[in-house]
Amino acid sequence: MTTLLAFAFVLGVLVFVHELGHFAAAKRVGIKVLKFQLGFNPTVLSFKRGDTVYGIGALPLGGYVKMAGDNPDETRAGEPDEFLSKSKWQRFQVLIMGPVMNIILAVILTAVVLYRGGEVPVYQDQPPVVGVVTAGSPASRADIRPGDLLVSVADHSVKTWEDFLVAIGTRPNQDISVTLLREGREITQRITPVPMAGQGRFEIGDIGVMPNVHPQLTSIVAGAPAEKAGLKAGDVVMSVDGQPMTLRSQLRDTIAKYPNRTISMTVVRNGVEQTIPVTTAVGCTGVPPDIGCIGVSIGDEMKPINPTAWGAVVMSVETNVRSAGLIFQTLWGLVTRETSPKQLIGPVAIAQLSGESAQLGLIALLSLMATFSLNLGIVNLLPIPVLDGGHIFIMAIEGVARRDFSVRVKEKMLLAGFVMLMMLMVTVIYNDLTRISWIERFMIWR
């Protein structure tokens, strides 16, 4: 039930904002709006105010604004308040405002999330210098070494770890080039990212490299060996018995190997490095017997972000610009076959993600809504007939040709766009179904 309610809320808000953009722009340029509906027919609730009927449909998978004279197939009265009676510039304003409203919503929601503050990995905005190479990984086989500076992936420049992880993550099972800088020399290697383990529903590429980071103690259990030894939440663990610690799994496994033994942990606290002896125990809550434990929760090394209101807006714009670039890159990758269609998600996956985010809290749900709103805004700007961008594209061609196309030509263009969208919809729904384990078992061809 939580999933369905969250899905209806997310989709309802995004569609309402989108259609509100069309509605407000139409009113502003003097177009008569006959109906403004959220959801598809059958209409379950409606009322009329002025010339407009406001309604809610039974199927919460979209919405629409019906304007007078917006369909060439319908008989037109030729009134000045009809959509097709307006100039191309006025019609452009009406069409563009739906996607624009979604993009504005994405910026607002992201700013709200950022203004609340939080934590991000310390390495996220740092240059991608390799700190650790996993044994047996694609990076290891390609002779990528600690200290190498990753310069580009598939001929796309990567300036930060965030850029690199996105570039690799969107190319699982693809043979790509990775250029690195080693001792002043540029080296290019061919490498195939493998799907990251533990990601379940989504294919995220990984080559087995990590930045030079260290695990962090996120919490300490009262009365546990860690507290008795003087460890505190926030301590960054540099090494154990002189062995450098990079991954939280590495620290966890190292502690597990030494039950009832005193180990020497070097940590950094408030910028000061210190070495603390800790005597491990067995039988900690949630830990199997005979396994060493000290009563801590371990996470990645993080740094806080607490922007001002204006700073949150600036960061939001920067974040959405980067995300928009990634969306365009992904869309172009689908055309050039650099991006796997398996990474696309449809309504089923959106519903699942909405439910999971709702369970995590309002901030997580708002963050997800911002992502979907940006995607909806940008996708609707694509020059595909049926979409807003498609109608704008047709108007642009008519403007260049200095004549309007016939109804028959427009119908053929819209039909082609409809077929493309249906093919895309079948693809994303198929992807969604493959991510549901009990359904995938019936797909014997996979």
Image: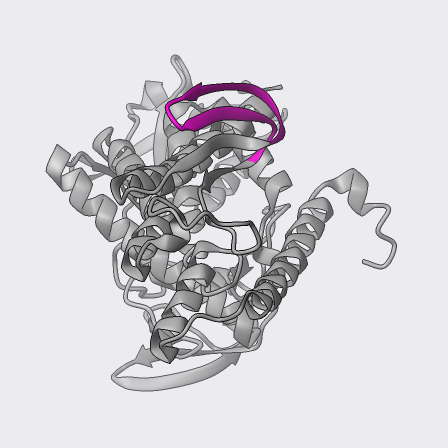
Position of the C terminus, as image quadrant, is bottom right
**What percent of the width, then of the height, locates residue 411?**
59, 63
The front one of 83 and 348 is: 83
Q: Is residue 145 above or below residue 438?
A: below
The front one of 294 and 176 is: 176
Residue 60 in magenta stretch: yes
**What percent of the width, then of the height, locates residue 196?**
57, 55
Q: Is residue 275 above or below residue 163?
A: above
The front one of 257 and 162 is: 162
| Residues in magenta, as a range | 41-61
**What percent of the width, then of the height, locates residue 192?**
57, 72
Position of the N terminus, as image quadrant, is top right
Q: Is residue 440 above or below residue 293?
A: below
Q: Is residue 296 left or right of residue 173?
A: left
**What percent of the width, then of the height, locates residue 415?**
63, 62
Quadrant in the rendering for residue 294:
top left
Residue 203 in magenta stretch: no
Q: How many marks?
A: 0
Tell me the residue at 39%/13% (across/down).
223
Q: Is residue 246 visible?
A: no
Tell me the residue at 29%/25% (across/down).
232
Quadrant in the rendering for residue 326:
bottom left
Q: Is residue 442 above or below residue 342?
A: above
Tell me the residue at 35%/57% (across/down).
324
